[in-house]
Image (tube, coloured by chain):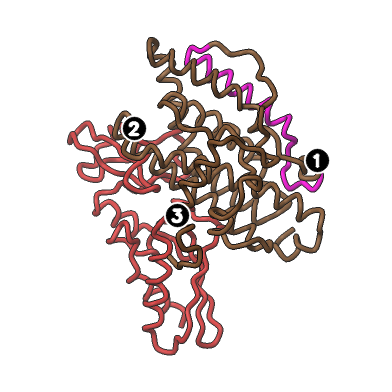
């Protein structure tokens, strides 16, 4: 599928593709917004500068996915970002959680970045060419997020004492939601069948576990037992009150005058 | 004829690095002409770059000054996508003159090459922060002249 025009001619393909694009866009937008909340509050200036750049990148990636959706007949990117209901949001619940402390924010970001890297890799040869090209570019940018989050994650663990204790608490909290980031939603099978994403979610999850276990060892953390099924499945539009709050804050200015031109 | 458009775009600078043009940054992919209408394909350096709309406006304004141009459309493309290897040799020199180390080239085999200090050319810098004042820059520290410097990320 070289273009939006071609994709729109195949109803089943279009349905699956759109659903995946919403997952990708909502993941990046939600986490990007959380990142931006660290502005001015990080423990050091380097962390502050980093989260601002990372937020900008993530929101930029969300815009790219929203634009692909727009080309496929969905509304314009601003409306998709600011004016969709909670039940239409497809991000993983983990990413909408409040930032908590520094350890939680770093650990969550790192775990998501590893997943995102694997998912992007599986998109670089997507049958939907515009998505494949974008994935290659996005992955090059995400490389720096991954390096940054990994080094902080390991540093916090190796520091011992309070830093390690907080990191352990963070992992415990993340474990309640982690199951929700793996998986491609209701059209999972179709997505793989159509080669929109070239690897099944289960295979990517196993690779995630391997890479994460390595990082846990580096950070001198004990690998926890397997996680329980999640309370809310974000991929199906189920969300926590924390997302409701986030959306209210994020769309506050937009809602004053949705027709305003910026 | 086409060279004239490229020359004109040398006047459009990267808003965040005011000495380097978008042509020298390697951001202009192609310029297509249909009658009096120009379509300019521009490759963003980073997807979330906030300077894009400024660049769009400046490209349009600059090309509309050219004789015989009635309409200009700027299209941002990701296929092919920008890589830091696209910065021209002149662009790399101008970055250095502005105090930003040009990005390591992709054939550099080191996993994370630290660029030479743009002030004293010493090669014993260390990474200070992977992120800097803009998405495309990182911050290093030169151990010889003992000052921090910025460098463009390899991408």
Q: Are the residues flagged by discs 1 and 2 from a single subunit?
A: yes
Quadrant in which residue A164 is drawn: top left
Residue at (76%, 63%) from the top-left corner? A6
Would you say the residues marked 1 and 2 are in contact, meaning their CB atoms lie under 8 Å apart? Answer: no
User: Is residue A150 one of those drawn in magenta?
Assistant: no
In the picture of the structure, the residue carrying the numbered disc 3 is: B45
Q: Nearer the observer, disc 1 or disc 2? A: 2
Question: Which residue occupies the foreground of this view, A249 or A203?
Answer: A249
Chain ID, red in image: B
Describe the element under mark 3 as helix, strand or loop. Answer: loop
Chain letter of the residue carrying label 3: B
Considering only vertical position in the picture, is B17 above or below A27?
A: below
Q: Nearer the viewer, residue A182 or B39?
A: A182
> On the rendered structure, is A250 left or right of B128?
right
Q: Nearer the viewer, mark 3 or mark 2?
A: 2
Q: Is residue B31 above or below residue A225?
A: below
Residue for badge 2: A42
Residue that appears at 68% across and 28% down: A205
- Which chain is painted in brown? A
Badge 2 marks a residue whose secondary structure is loop
Dot label at residue A189: 1
Q: Which mark is residue B38?
A: none
Q: Report the predominant secondary structure element of the magenta stretch.
A: helix
Stretch in magenta: A192-221
Q: Are marks 1 and 3 on the same chain?
A: no
């Amino acid at each position: 599928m070289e273009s939006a025009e071609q994709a729109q001619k195949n109803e089943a393909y279009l349905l699956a593709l759109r659903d995946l694009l919403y997952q990708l866009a909502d993941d990046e937008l939600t986490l990007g917004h959380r990142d931006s909340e660290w502005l001015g509050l990080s423990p050091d200036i380097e962390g502050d500068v980093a989260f601002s750049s990372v937020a900008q990148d993530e929101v930029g990636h969300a815009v790219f996915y929203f634009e692909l959706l727009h080309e496929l007949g969905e509304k314009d990117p601003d409306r998709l970002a600011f004016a969709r209901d909670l039940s239409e949001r497809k991000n993983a619940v983990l990413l909408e959680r409040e930032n908590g402390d520094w350890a939680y924010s770093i650990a969550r970001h790192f775990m998501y970045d590893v997943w995102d890297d694997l998912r992007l890799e599986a998109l670089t040869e997507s049958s939907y060419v515009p998505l494949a090209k974008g994935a290659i570019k996005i992955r090059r940018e995400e490389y720096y997020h991954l390096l940054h989050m990994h080094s902080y994650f390991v540093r916090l663990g190796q520091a011992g004492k309070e830093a390690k204790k907080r990191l352990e608490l963070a992992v415990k909290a993340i474990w309640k939601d982690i199951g929700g980031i793996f998986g491609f939603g209701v059209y999972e099978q179709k997505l793989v069948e159509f080669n929109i994403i070239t690897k099944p979610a289960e295979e990517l999850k196993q690779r995630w576990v391997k890479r994460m276990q390595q990082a846990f060892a580096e950070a001198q953390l004990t690998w926890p037992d397997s996680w329980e099924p999640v309370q809310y499945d974000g991929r199906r539009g189920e969300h926590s009150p924390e997302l409701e709050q986030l959306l209210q804050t994020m769309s506050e200015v937009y809602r004053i005058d949705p027709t305003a031109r910026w | 004829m086409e060279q004239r458009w490229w020359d004109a775009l040398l006047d459009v600078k990267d808003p965040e690095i005011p000495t380097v043009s978008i042509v020298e940054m390697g951001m202009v992919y192609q310029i297509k002409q249909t009658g009096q209408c120009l379509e300019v394909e521009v490759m963003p350096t980073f997807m979330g770059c906030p300077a894009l709309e400024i660049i769009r406006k400046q490209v349009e304004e600059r090309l509309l000054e050219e004789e015989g141009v009635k309409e200009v459309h700027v299209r941002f493309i990701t296929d092919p996508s920008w890589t830091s290897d696209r910065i021209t040799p002149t662009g790399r020199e101008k970055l250095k003159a502005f105090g930003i180390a040009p990005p390591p080239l992709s054939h550099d085999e080191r996993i994370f090459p630290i660029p030479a200090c743009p002030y004293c050319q010493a090669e014993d810098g260390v990474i200070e922060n992977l992120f800097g004042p803009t998405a495309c820059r990182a911050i290093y520290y030169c151990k010889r002249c003992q000052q921090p410097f910025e460098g463009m990320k390899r991408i």
